[in-house]
Amino acid sequence: MRGDRLVSILLLLQSHGQMTAKALSERLEVSERTIYRDMDALSGTGIPVVAERGKNGGWSLLEDYQTDLTGLKESEIRALFVSPSSQLLDDLGLTRTSEEARNKLIASLPSIYRENAKGVWNRIHIDTSSWRKQKEKIASFEVIKEAIWKEQKLRISYQRADGKTDDRIIVEPLGLVAKGDLWYLVASKENGDIRNYRASRILSADSLARTFVRPQGFDLAQYWTSSTQSFIKRLPSYEVKVEVSPLALSRLTFTGRFARVLEMGDRNKENWIPVTLSFDTEDEAKGYILGFADQVRVIEPKILRQNILEMAEAAVAFHR
């Protein structure tokens, strides 16, 4: 295992140029102390790994150093040939390019692995589209992509979640992230703050004749993970304890509403299942639970039971 990890460290440093001990430990799922021991081991074998201290420091290989590591494991070949999302490739205009690249990779493999690599395409397929949701239109997607590759600043008009529009925002586009079938632009503002913009809410984007320098050491995947975790922590939470009929249990997470199942208990004497749910607001909880009619009953909070009863009575009176 250690030998594989040392090889992985070399490949990471070759592809990223410089990485901190923390970043390496997270990628390889070991402690930072283990990374430091691995660096000593690499240095002891004559591999020129160097450490730079300071805020923008980290581990790197001496300039122009390259290893001659060759030979792919069968599991690594499978990882390379897992079919990416055809929808996302199409959004990026890379469908044909991806297919051509995979054909070239297959041609470069030893014949003993070639058929196995082809077989991966027929065994795993990734579809990020939802069942009924209409695909969001992105007005200036081509302009955004071009600005990212050319590192050119953008002037965008952005519609916020509250419906208001911010015009003439100047941003430095750092990358695109696909979350499910939605695209987000990660960009730095003029004051240095990095923000996420839902691409479908960018009403217009104009490329400026000014380039920018990407933040040193910026890692899009690591930033997105950290940003997502912070967003989840800031979400409002409204917890509800309910009992669910066995007939409705499988539908709890397939309603199209944002409900999270926090805990599920054992069936009680009446054969109902106690479940703890979390919503963003009480209004979401009321609409969600009312949609199950007599298949979900509220235990706590009691005020929610009364509010749902009033909603149901109002609906009956209105339609009558």
Image: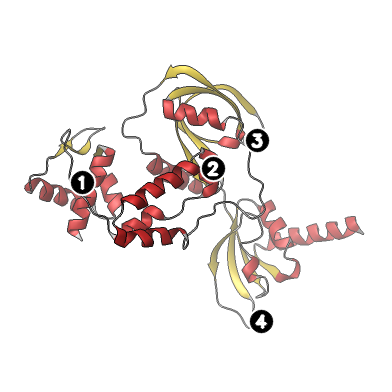
Q: Secondary structure at mark 2?
A: helix
Residue at 37% x, 61% y: name it: 115
Work out which quarter of the rendered image holds the N terminus and state it: bottom left
Three-letter code, disc 4: Glu
Q: Amino acid at mark 1?
A: Leu
**Disc 3 versus disc 2: distance between alpha carbons?**
30 Å
Q: Residue at 40%, 43% (x, y): give it.
A: 221
The dot on residue 270 is 4
The residue where tag 1 is placed is 10
The alpha-carbon separation of the residues under discs 3 and 1 comes to 47 Å
* Residue 36 on image: x %, y %: 16, 48
Q: Residue furthest bottom?
A: 269
Circles 4 and 1 in contact, beta carbons < 8 Å: no
The mark that comes first in sequence, 4 or 1, is: 1
Q: Toward the viewer: 53 or 94?
A: 94
* Mark closest to the chain's N terminus, 3 or 2: 2
Q: Is residue 188 visible?
A: no
Residue 210: give x, y in percent of width and height: 44, 17
Residue, disc 3:
162
Q: Under tag 1, what secondary structure? A: helix
Q: Amino acid at mark 2?
A: Asp
Q: Which residue is mark 2?
A: 90
Label 4, label 1: how far apart the Cα atoms are: 60 Å
Q: Nearer the viewer, mark 2 or mark 1?
A: 2
